[in-house]
Amino acid sequence: MTERKDMQDLEELLRAVPPEAAGVDPGAVTPWGSAMKKILWGMGLLTFRLNLWYLPYLLPLVGAALLCLGARRLRQANSGFCRTWRLSLVKLCWQVIFLVVTATRLGTLLGAGPAFWMVSAVGCGLDFLLLLALRRGIRGAFLDLDGKPPRDWLLPGLAAWLGTLALAVWGTLEPMPAGGMAALWARGLGAAALYGLLLWLLHRQGKALERRGYQIVPAPVRCPDGAVIALVLLGTVLLTVPAAVWGARTPAPAGTAAGTTDLEAVRAHLEDLGMPETLAVDLSREDLELCEGAVAVHESTNHLLNGDPAAPQDLGGGTVDLQSWAVVLPDQSIRFFLTFQWQELPVLSLQEGVSASPDSGKAFTDLTARLTWTEDGTRLAADLPVSLAGGQKAEELTEEQLWWYEEELKRLGRLQYQPYALFSLPKGGEAVRGYLAYSREAKVEDYPGGTIFGGWYYLHQSAPRYPYQDVEAYLRGRSGQILSFGGSSFPAVGVSYGTYVWFRP
Amino acid sequence: MDLEKLLAEYAGMMAYIVGGILRDPQETEECLGEIRLKLTEGQAAYDSGRGTEAAWLTAVCRNAALDRLRRRKRRREEPLPETMAGGPGPEELLLERERAEALRKALLTLSDRERRLFYRKYYYLQPTAQLAAELGLTERAVEGKLYRIRKKLQKQLGGERP
């Protein structure tokens, strides 16, 4: 009885303390308003990115969750809102999957070509269906006294959305428009303005129906809004971390048992000339054929950017020894072998790369790359595919680059290529080593004091990165530009190492 | 003030407030009818100096619904404690004013959200399930929040139950 009496007293007492006397707005009780607010914020966060720390990834995820939570509240009002909620759930899952895939190699595969267009089409289709369902829900839930739907603010909003999409497609097909930077800015601002218009129209629609929003009966929830957002964030992180480790690994090459060839005499001759056994024994048949009749073998001096050129380098908890060798051939050419040998394997091997920057004096030929290791007592070997970066022609260069590379273009007709090979260290492999090799026309007598024949790098990713960053994309540069060597900062990859090849006979 | 226009604009809000207290569609409709009649006959006049139109309407609706609820409870033979014959005297009125002022000050120490929740539960008498659904919380979470709010107010009022 006391509790009931207390409640009655309180009710009576509150007559004398109406809401406005305690600073409470009696009109701000509508369930519709809070749902629309979440939907609006969700759509805003999904589209407008803040490029700071990991916010470009976290904020859209929170946006997808807010969109879902807003639609969740309305889901029982009518079929349109129910469909909005279901589509928002799909959108949330899509966003989570996108974030997880972005941590893996698959992310770069989906970032270009037909896969990119397909993924984009699905994403945009989902957004459009969401807006359509939301519009249908609103028009179904709010009718005037004479049964007419309310004023349609969302229809022009859909048109604005389509305009944004058109500009986005144009931007993808033609990154730099014909009008130059001015057109680029105008396009970007136009897209932002159109999407801002959509959000404003959605806000207006929500506000226009606020007084009637009381008729929406919100659906009960089992999991509070805050808990949903926390679970979504935590779940995404828990999925992303292993994805960044296991999904970011370059496939290790499949090795075959390294056997003998009919060119073992060439191998022995190279060793006699001074080639280390660890390199000679690893040479492929193709390399042995190219080195047949070699007249000399010289160790190229490595000039490190920092540190002792003779000492092995610490990388990712391991130690790798880098050396370069020059095999002088009878046809007045030199075959360079850029070798690496892991003395102690690193803790984690996600991406490894060997990349050369041959000088621009002459073109090079006969690219090969090889990786060898021991597994269960058997020596295995794998030929690595070699790709080429650089090689731009005059019409692909800016004016400044044309001036800078004028001589090189005259000599080669294009910029010098930069070969590279990518791999990861085989799991369970020991005594891992390998090389990247190329031949270059050169008369040793022309360089009595030695010369720099180029530079090369061994790149090793020692820690997972988010988003996944392809070493290959880094080697090729952000927009196909030349990789500049000589710097000490390679932010794309965890740890990198550079050295010059200076041949002094 | 155009009463018809006002009633049309706030019809949803009025139904929401009355429905939350009475929780019966028929009773809600009847109560809304009584309110409209009361307003059109000028039995409850709006004083712009005391607050907004929305605030005035919510107070009228709330009080009307509460009165109807009490009448319903009396009909169901759930006698309420007797009130004093002849209404409260001057001393009781003064005491009540002081208590109301103390409660108002205590309510101002709560956050906006807590105050809104408190009013929705104890002024508008909205059921916990409705509050939970509208706020995106579970019923248990709402009950927990209300318990903490009552404890805070109790502390502010010096141990006296709010």
Image: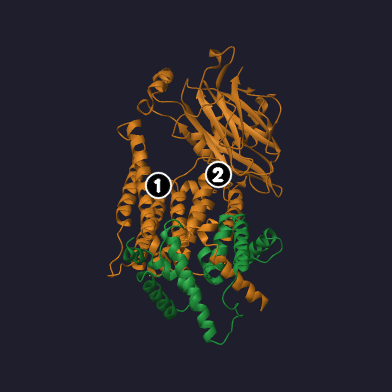
Q: Secondary structure at mark 1?
A: helix
Image coordinates for residue A61, horizontal then vertical, percent: 51, 52
Q: Which residue is mark 2?
A: A54
Q: Which chain is green?
A: B
Q: Quadrant of residue A138?
A: bottom left
Going from the N terminus, do you reach mark 2 or mark 1 first?
2
Q: Residues within 10 Å of mark 1 (few under 14, many from 20)?
A: few
- Percent from the top left, x then y, of residue A8? 59, 73
The label nearer to you, 2 versus 1, is 2
Amino acid type at image mark 1: Gly
Position above or below: B30 against B132: below
Element at label 2: loop
| Residue A113 tag number | 1
Q: Which is nearer the eye, A344 or B127? A: B127
Q: In the image shown, does A252 or A218 lie closer to the viewer?
A: A218
B137 sits left or right of A151 in the view: right
Query: What is chain A's hue in the picture?
Result: orange
Side of A26 relative to A205 (left or right): right
Q: Which mark is residue B101?
A: none
- Residue A164: x and y, percent? 34, 47
